[in-house]
Image (cartoon, rainbow, N blue to C red):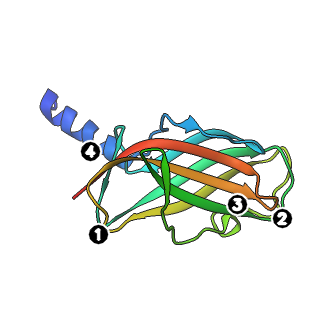
């Protein structure tokens, strides 16, 4: 039996929503590292539709240009060029997939969660995600546009 084009299209669409696709992002000042890839899952299309009450998986692959004993994440919702702090469950990069101490020239996969609380307003904004080293310098900084929806 040959599957109909509609069934094939629906199956491909379902598979695409499960897989994390590399996102188009803006590097906003990575000094001590270089970003190789940013994934937000699920985010099949951009801008990412972030649904209230849902948690999203963040995976950033980057290479370090320095050595550091630790790292700390800071996340913001950028609205009208103002950074509003966005709490995340685990700001310690060494507890987020990175084996510390961080070594110069090594690649790392940073893994975290982005919870979208039910009380957040339905709004378009920019998510800005920073990871700083133990000298408070940027290992990476990236921005993506998002839409928070009900």
Element assignment for label 1: loop
Among numbered discs 2 and 3, the one appearing first in the sequence: 2
Q: Is residue 1 visible?
A: no
Among numbered discs 4 and 1, the one appearing first in the sequence: 4
Q: CA distance from mark 3 to mark 4?
A: 31 Å
Q: Which residue is mark 4?
A: 14
- The x and y percentages for residue 121 are 28, 60
37 to the left or right of 6: right
Mark whose residue sits in front, 3 or 1: 1
115 to the left or right of 31: left
Mark whose residue sits in front, 2 or 3: 2
Crowding near the residue tagged with mark 1, few <14, some 14–19, many ≥20 C-alpha atoms within 10 Å: few
Q: CA distance from mark 4 to mark 1?
A: 29 Å
Closer to us: 24 or 26: 26
Element assignment for label 4: helix
Among numbered discs 2 and 4, the one appearing first in the sequence: 4
Q: Is residue 7 visible?
A: yes
Q: Which residue is mark 2?
A: 69
- The x and y percentages for residue 134 are 80, 62
Crowding near the residue tagged with mark 4, few <14, some 14–19, many ≥20 C-alpha atoms within 10 Å: few
Q: Which residue is mark 3?
A: 98
- The x and y percentages for residue 118 are 28, 69
Closer to us: 24 or 44: 24
Q: CA distance from mark 3 to mark 1?
A: 31 Å
Q: CA distance from mark 2 to mark 4?
A: 41 Å
Element assignment for label 2: loop
Residue 102: name its quadrant. bottom right
Mark whose residue sits in front, 2 or 1: 1
Residue at position x 72%, y 49% in the image: 138
């Amino acid at each position: 039996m040959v599957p109909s084009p509609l069934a094939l299209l629906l199956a491909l669409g379902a598979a695409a929503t499960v897989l994390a696709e590399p996102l188009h992002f803006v590097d906003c000042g990575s000094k001590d590292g270089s970003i190789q890839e940013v994934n937000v899952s699920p985010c099949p299309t951009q801008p990412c539709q972030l649904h209230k009450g849902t948690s999203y998986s963040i995976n950033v692959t980057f290479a370090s240009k320095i050595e550091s004993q630790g790292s700390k994440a800071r996340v913001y919702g950028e609205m009208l060029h103002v950074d509003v702090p966005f709490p995340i469950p685990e700001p310690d990069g060494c507890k987020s997939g990175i084996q510390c101490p961080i070594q110069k020239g090594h690649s790392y996969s940073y893994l975290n969660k982005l919870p979208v609380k039910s009380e957040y307003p339905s709004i378009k904004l920019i998510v800005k995600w920073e990871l700083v080293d133990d000298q408070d310098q940027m290992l990476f900084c990236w921005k993506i546009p998002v839409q928070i929806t009900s």
